[in-house]
Amino acid sequence: MYIEKYWDEYIGGSDDSLNLVAFLEDQKKEEISLSEIFDKIGLNKLNWNFRQTVEYLGFTHSNGVEIDFYFAIDVITDLAAILLECKVNKVVNLHELDEYDSPSRNIRIIVTPEEYNALDKVLSDFVQNPLEYDLSDMMGEDEIKDMAVEVNALRKELYELSKATEATII
């Protein structure tokens, strides 16, 4: 898995990460758009401002269990890593994201160029202002700053790959 270098502690290592994988698994689709993900878990209500999670984020699993997301920026950074994997390898295997509870099944997240640009702005804002995000209340200052360094490296890779893809389409 290409994103293995990111998918660990700060990215992919939270309860929100496990809940996101459960959400993706529950969709029973090979392809899902970023806008559909935003709509189904409530990120669309935040209008690309993920500093404070003021709206309910979550979904009802097909087994009837309500699953909550606690920090919007956690979900966004996890989605960015998954998008990077999809850019590099065309798909991501859910089992590689959660080897304990997810089956081996490939999915792909579809993103528009406008969504890539918006995501880049959000990730850049987090990198520049990590202490402004509600997640920082749950982490020490050094930890949130370390996470910002990781997110910046991820953002740079994702942004460079998305720009390269746009250039080949034109």
Image: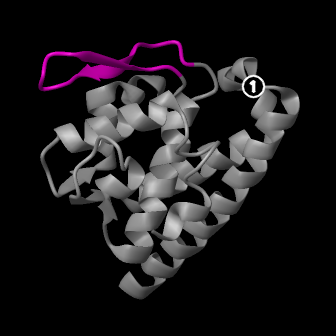
Q: Give the residue drawn at x 63%, y 60%.
A: 154
Reading the image, the residue beneath label 1 is 139
Front-most of residues 70 and 133: 70
The quarter holding residue 141 reads top right
Secondary structure of the residue carrying numbered label 1: loop
Give the residue displayed 75% in from the left and 45% down from the top: 148
- Tell me residue 166's x, y (percent): 44, 76
Query: Which residue shows up at 59% across the image and 49% down it?
Result: 8
Residue 165 appears in the picture as rendered: yes
Q: Was residue 58 drawn as part of the magenta stretch in this picture?
A: yes
Report if residue 31 lies within the magenta region. no
Q: Position of residue 62 (x, y in %)?
A: 12, 26
Crowding near the residue tagged with mark 1, few <14, some 14–19, many ≥20 C-alpha atoms within 10 Å = few
Magenta part of the protein: which range? 53-70
- The amino acid pointed to by label 1 is Met
Residue that appears at 42% across and 87% down: 168
Q: Is residue 75 above or below residue 148?
A: above
Is residue 78 shown above or below 85? above
